[in-house]
Every structure is written in C-alpha cells, then in structure tokens.
Amino acid sequence: MENIKIEATTRSPEIDFDFGANKFLIKGESYPEDVATFYGLVIDQLEEHLSSLDTAEVSFEIELIYFNSSSAKVLMGLFDTLDEVAKAGNRVTITWTYDEGDDHMQETGEEFSEDLEHAQFRLKILET
Amino acid sequence: MYKFREHLREQGIMFCYSGYMTEQILTGIGDAIKQKLEVEEADRKTARSVFSVFVEQVQNVIRYSAEREVKEPSAEHKPGESDQDTSLRYGVLTVGRTDEKYFIACGNFVEQKDVERLRSSLAHIQGLNKNGLKALYKEILSGETPEGSKGAGVGFVDIARRATHGFEFDFTELNDGRSYFCLKAYV
C-alpha cells in the first residue's frame, strides 16, 4: 500500500502513515471543516492495511494540540481498531504525546486508553 | 456605532459577531482569539478551553441554526450531501471576560419542536459532575451517532467539560414556531 503523507494545516493535522514500517503518526490541530472528508479515506486505508497484518510490530503516535468533538469520535474509533489489531496477534503501541501542563489532553488520552485490552499505551510529555 | 462599541466594552466583550457563520469565519475569528489570548498571557489550559468552546459553539450554529438561507445547489452538489454545504446559517457570537472569567456566548434560532430535547439534554449535562461528564462523553463517542446529528453529537458535553465555571442556557419562545436559544459558557 502506498504511504500517506499529508501536510498539516491550521485546522487539520499532519498525517504520516508508513505502511511498510507500520509506523503511523497524527500530529497537530484537528478541527477540520468536515471530519468525514478529512479522515474517511485515510482511516479506511489504514484499517484495510492493519487487518492484513499478522504478528507485526505497529507503532501509532498521536501528538495533538487540540481536537474538536467530531475528531474525538474518529480517535475513539481508531483506538478500537488498534486494540482489535493487537488482539489479532500484533504488537501494537499507541503513544499519546501532549504539551506539558495541558491536563485536558492528558486526561483525554487516559480516557481513550481505558478500554484498551490488548494494545500498549504510553503517555509522553512534550516539554516546552 | 460608538455607543455600540462602548456597550460591548462595558460588557467585557472582546469579540462580537452577528451574521451568517461559515467555516472560514470560524477559522478567522478562531485565529484572532488565539492571538488575543496569547497577548493577554492566558495560561495554556485556559486559552485552549476558550478556543475549544468557541469551536463547538460556532460549529453548532453552522450545523443547526434554524435561521438560514438556502443556497442554490452547486453543479458539484451530490444527492444525499448534507445541507450543511448548501445553507448559510445565522448566529450571534460574543467572547469576552468579566471578573477574571472568560465567557463564550452564542445565540441562534431553533425550531420549537427541538426545544424540549435540547433543554432536557442541557439540563442533564448541567447536573453532572466531572466523572459523570466523562462517562457521558465516552458513552456518546462509542455509541452510534444520534439521529439528526451532523457531528459526533457530543458537542455540549465537550463544552461542559471545558467550562470550568459552568454554563447557562435559555430559550425564548417566539410566536412563529421557533425559539431563540442562547448558551453561555464560562472558563
């Protein structure tokens, strides 16, 4: 599958999906005009790729400054998908990076991770 | 105009917009709010909360205001496309500060038939504590998107979680089958 690289804009995050290395990154701001248009295709491709994996090492990095409630729904779905992939026998690590002092981001990261049963979750503080 | 400006100043209002809301307006005002908060040296958490409530409020107007102009569908308009793309929706927004608290207030018309649902949903959210809000937030996010929702249907909960000093709301019933809905959140 062809890698996906999308530059960040004021309202949408950088997306860097390296399917060969199984390294994935979502970084920046996330309040796109239309969440379904922005995330729909990339998430579909991601899911298709992940479902084909078997005993792979998957690293997913999320480094968001701000996301709106529509984006939260996408993130929640992503966590579910990644947990399923881990359940299927892959080693999945999700790294949630937030700015030092941003308790809200820390809390939401922790909340999203609460339902994970198979994937590993790491919180990382970005010191500024 | 000077009197109007003075009135806004007395109310602590830094930003005031009344008109049709578009995504471009959200981007522009949002950017100005960020800059203003930076100049004021608001702490990061406060600044992000104010910005976040602003985004959810404005997106509510863009998606749901009952005062709207329906644009002619463009040539590219596909059947089944949401009417969000073909409607210009009207709303009023103010952002300001009083007594060391920031406030973000939004007002727009809503259909009378939606008032009870909105009122009970907001009253329920208002009665929840931190943990209750968190549970409802997750419940809505992991469930199916509610009927009639164009986003995740979790916007009010998100506003409540960010509004560290609470929020208030009001519906003024008009005699044309609509009500005027106001929501003011304090950070």
Image: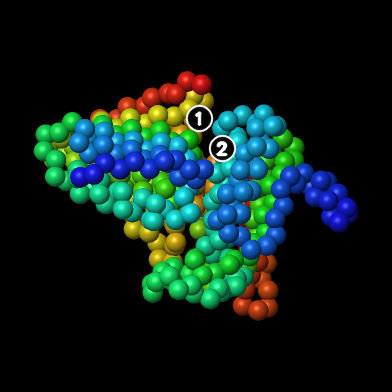
B50 with respect to A74 (left or right): right
For the residues beneath circles 2 and 1, the answer to whether they share a chain is: no
Q: Quadrant of the C terminus of chain B?
A: top right
Q: Amino acid at mark 1?
A: Asp
Residue at 47% in and 40% down:
A29
As drawn, the residue found furthest toward the top would be A127
Is residue B95 visible in the rendered image? The answer is: yes
- The residue lying toward the viewer, choosing from A78 and B131, is A78
Residue B7, label in figure: none
Q: Position of residue B179 (x, y in %)?
A: 63, 70
Residue at 36% in and 50% down:
A39
Whole-Å distance between the Cαs marked 2 and 1? 9 Å
User: Which chain is indicated by disc 2?
Assistant: B
Residue A102, label in figure: 1
> Can you identify the residue that label 2 sits on?
B48
Q: Position of residue A66 (x, y in %)?
A: 48, 39
- Tags 2 and 1 touching, CB below 8 Å: yes
Query: Residue B92's image quarter?
Result: bottom right
Query: Residue B175's image quarter?
Result: bottom right
- The residue lying toward the viewer, choosing from B122 and A105, is A105
As drawn, the residue found furthest toward the right would be B3
SS class, disc 2: helix
Q: Position of residue A49 (x, y in %)?
A: 19, 45
Q: Residues within 10 Å of mark 2 (few under 14, many from 20)?
A: many
Q: Residues within 10 Å of mark 1 (few under 14, many from 20)?
A: some
Q: Amino acid at mark 2?
A: Arg
User: Which chain is indicated by disc 1?
Assistant: A
